[in-house]
Amino acid sequence: MDEAVRMDTVSKVYGKGSGAVAALREVTTGIPRGRFTAVMGPSGSGKSTFLHCAAGLDTPTSGSVRLGGTELSAMSETELTELRRDRVGFVFQAFNLVSSLTVMQNITLPLRLARTRADQAWVDEVVARVGLTGRTGHRPAELSGGQQQRVAIARALVTRPDVVFGDEPTGALDTMTAREVLTLLRETVDATGQTVVMVTHDPVAASYADTVLFLADGRVVDTMDAPSSERVAARMTRLGAWN
Ligand SMILES: Nc1ncnc2c1ncn2[C@@H]1O[C@H](COP(=O)(O)OP(=O)(O)OP(=O)(O)O)[C@@H](O)[C@H]1O
Ligand SMILES: [Mg+2]
């Protein structure tokens, strides 16, 4: 299968000596291109570390990460910076918008940083897709939380990245607004073939994905296709996630 991310025996150890923490332990897995993948696991199981290593935000202690066919371990810090800017998109729990910029300026910021001329038709399509047409002149503070996260999603999509990564992108939203954002991510995958990888604690959020990867103690311990929230919750219970 065509893979957007390939990890082979990826380990990540934080710290040294007796204080060392193994956040990932020889993880070998692939993330299929054009699909929606959720990453679940107990707190501290390595989900954020997994995401950061897959996206070139953090460097594994050992092992190989390939993103869109490019081996990340061979890249210089400058090359990694360009890769993060041009080939991955991020959506965080805390939105991370620039408060002094308008919605449109926030969305097109990655293009300006890359000194790429905006393809106005694509920008307009992204704005329409996230439902922000008519709001592009507003500042983030004038928007609801759900609308702010839609701006962040548009900003992540605008460079047509290999992968959009989300670390609990619905974690700060109420249930209804979270559902809208998850539906938007689902529709984006279905309509444009965008690859999305999302860390979540919520079995309902995970049920929007095509596949769920379960992490426990730094290892991928299971995968589930066509997940339902009930099956995901049962699997999490067996992992001791709610203790
Ligand atoms: N910068 C760091 N320095 C030291 N230890 C770290 C660092 N980042 C993460 N860890 C440790 O690595 C392990 C995995 O952390 P990680 O943040 O990936 O877990 P997580 O699954 O995202 O947890 P949560 O659900 O709470 O967000 C934890 O034991 C954590 O304490
Ligand atoms: Mg985390």
Image (cartoon, rainbow, N blue to C red):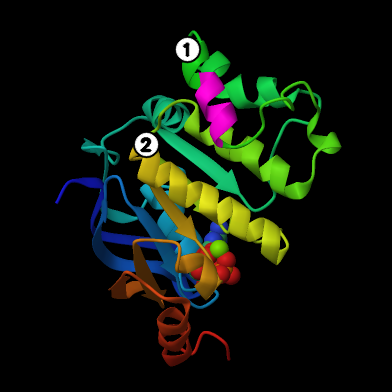
Is residue 56 a member of the stretch shown in magenta?
A: no
Element type at mark 2: helix
Residue 42 % position (x, y) = 50, 78
Residue 169 % position (x, y) = 59, 54
Q: Is residue 139 above or below residue 52?
A: above
Neighbourhood count class around disc 2 (C-alpha, 10 Å): few under 14, some 14–19, many 20 upward: few
Q: Tell me the amino acid under the disc marked 2.
A: Thr
From this viewpoint, is residue 225 visible? yes
Q: Residue at x 47, y 11 (%)?
A: 116
Left or right: residue 78 compared with residue 170: left
Return the residue at label 1.
Answer: 119
Element type at mark 1: loop
Q: Is residue 122 above or below residue 147?
A: above
Mark nearer the N terminus (2 vs 1): 1
Q: Magenta segment range? A: 123-129
Neighbourhood count class around disc 1 (C-alpha, 10 Å): few under 14, some 14–19, many 20 upward: few
- Look at discs 2 and 1 and give the one toward the viewer: 2
Asked whether 13 or 40 is in front, the reply is: 40
Q: Tell me the amino acid under the disc marked 1.
A: Asp
Left or right: residue 67 compared with residue 158: left
Name the image quarter holding residue 163.
top left
Return the residue at label 2.
Answer: 192
Residue 206 % position (x, y) = 47, 67
Q: Residue at x 48, y 37 (%)?
A: 89
> Does ligand 2 reach within 8 Å of label 2's beta carbon?
no
